[in-house]
């Protein structure tokens, strides 16, 4: 039986690869893709999500548009990383599949209230605004979510947007706090983990050599995406963040983790959006997340190559 998932996302090249990995995996039933403002404004993220579905030859997937800005703070975007469109790199045609009329937040609430409790998982690849708003609109969804698997935060690695904060949490810390305080089972995949999943030349070339359409498109997405982080960190390749979320659901044995408390800083401007992770359990705060710290990067890229090769 396949796992019903909703992918909440702000594509973004790494989001795009995560979506492709999910669409290539029969273990999932993708109920919908909900777009949020993040890497680029909402008008682009929802179009990008549809472009990726069409690249995968799956134009029947339902794509919804969600929050246009964070709950309280002004939107911060990352064109310097992802390019003006958010998906700079390959030339992807404008999508012809429709955008769903329903608002993403309504779709998330309706789906969770209609489906049996504890069956639907949320994969969050961007700022948590849509999920935070859904919790405000219908708090009963908290006990109905099977699990949230979220890319976000960083502790030992620090931040990638400020010295203290990772992009997804920094953009909407208030939404993140709502999500982490809601009593939902959460798996968090922070920079501590994704910084080990590097798009080295050898790994990217495997996608380029594929004879389908999606493989070479993934290589071109990664060519563009990695250039910023390669310069920043001086590594061969950049961290491939968001596909780790999908990989955790497929093969959790690729990751090492601990169940610990994660609290989100929302007061201090200096450390705004920091994920304060009680890794050493030095407080009495209750564990509210499974936090990943290690990843078998070779196993992760092998899984991706095997799946992406099966796409169109
Ligand atoms: C996260 O921020 C975005 O730039 C990426 O898509 C990823 O979700 C990494 O900090
Ligand atoms: Ca993202």
Image: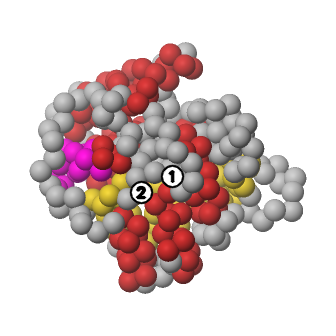
- Residue shown at 87%/57% (left/top)? 283
In front of the other: 55 or 134: 134
Q: Is residue 253 left or right of residue 68?
A: right
Residue under label 2, please give it. 67
Q: Quadrant of residue 84?
A: top left
- Residue shown at 38%/76% (left/top)? 111
Q: Is residue 274 left or right of residue 161?
A: right
Residue 8 lies, with reference to residue 156, above or below; the image says below
Which range is magenta? Answer: 46-59
Residue 62 lies, with reference to residue 240, above or below; the image says below
Can you see residue 187?
no
x, y (%) of residue 200?
44, 24
- Residue shown at 62%/63% (left/top)? 178
Q: Dividing the image into 4 quarters, which one contains the N terminus?
A: bottom left
Residue under label 1, please give it. 70
Q: Is residue 5 left or right of residue 181?
A: left
Estimate the spatial distance between the alpha carbons at disc 2 and disc 1, rounded to whole Å.
Answer: 7 Å
In front of the other: 75 or 38: 75
Q: Dividing the image into 4 quarters, which one contains the C terminus?
A: top left
x, y (%) of residue 257?
65, 51
In front of the other: 248 or 95: 95
Q: How many marks?
A: 2
10 Å crowding of disc 2: few (<14), some (14-19), many (20+)? many
Residue 4 lies, with reference to residue 89, above or below; the image says below
């Amino acid at each position: 039986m396949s796992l019903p998932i909703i992918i909440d996302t702000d594509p973004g090249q790494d989001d795009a690869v995560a979506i492709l990995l999910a669409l290539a995996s029969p273990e999932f039933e993708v109920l919908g893709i909900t777009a949020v403002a993040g890497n680029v404004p909402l008008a682009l993220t929802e179009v990008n999500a549809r472009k990726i579905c069409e690249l995968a030859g799956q134009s029947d997937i339902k794509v919804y548009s969600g929050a246009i800005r964070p709950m309280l703070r002004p939107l911060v975007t990352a064109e310097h990383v992802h390019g003006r469109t958010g998906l700079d790199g390959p030339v992807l045609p404008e999508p012809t599949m429709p955008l769903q009329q329903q608002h993403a937040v309504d779709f998330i609430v309706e789906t969770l209230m209609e489906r049996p409790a504890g069956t639907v998982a949320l994969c969050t690849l961007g700022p948590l605004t849509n999920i935070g708003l859904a919790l405000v609109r219908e708090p009963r969804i908290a006990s109905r979510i099977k699990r949230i698997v979220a890319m976000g935060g960083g502790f030992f690695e620090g931040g990638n947007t400020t010295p203290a904060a990772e992009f997804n949490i920094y953009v909407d810390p208030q939404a993140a706090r709502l999500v982490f305080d809601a009593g939902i089972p959460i798996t968090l995949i922070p920079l501590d983990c994704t910084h080990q999943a590097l798009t080295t030349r050898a790994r990217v070339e495997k996608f380029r050599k594929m004879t389908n359409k999606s493989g070479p498109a993934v290589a071109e997405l990664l060519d563009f995406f990695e250039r910023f982080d390669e310069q920043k960190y001086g590594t061969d390749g950049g961290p491939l963040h968001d596909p780790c979320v999908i990989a955790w659901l497929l093969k959790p044995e690729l990751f090492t983790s601990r169940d610990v408390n994660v609290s989100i800083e929302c007061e201090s401007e200096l450390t705004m959006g920091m994920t304060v992770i009680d890794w050493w359990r030095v407080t009495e705060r209750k564990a509210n997340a499974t936090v990943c710290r290690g990843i078998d990067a070779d196993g992760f890229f092998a899984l991706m190559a095997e799946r992406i090769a099966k796409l169109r």
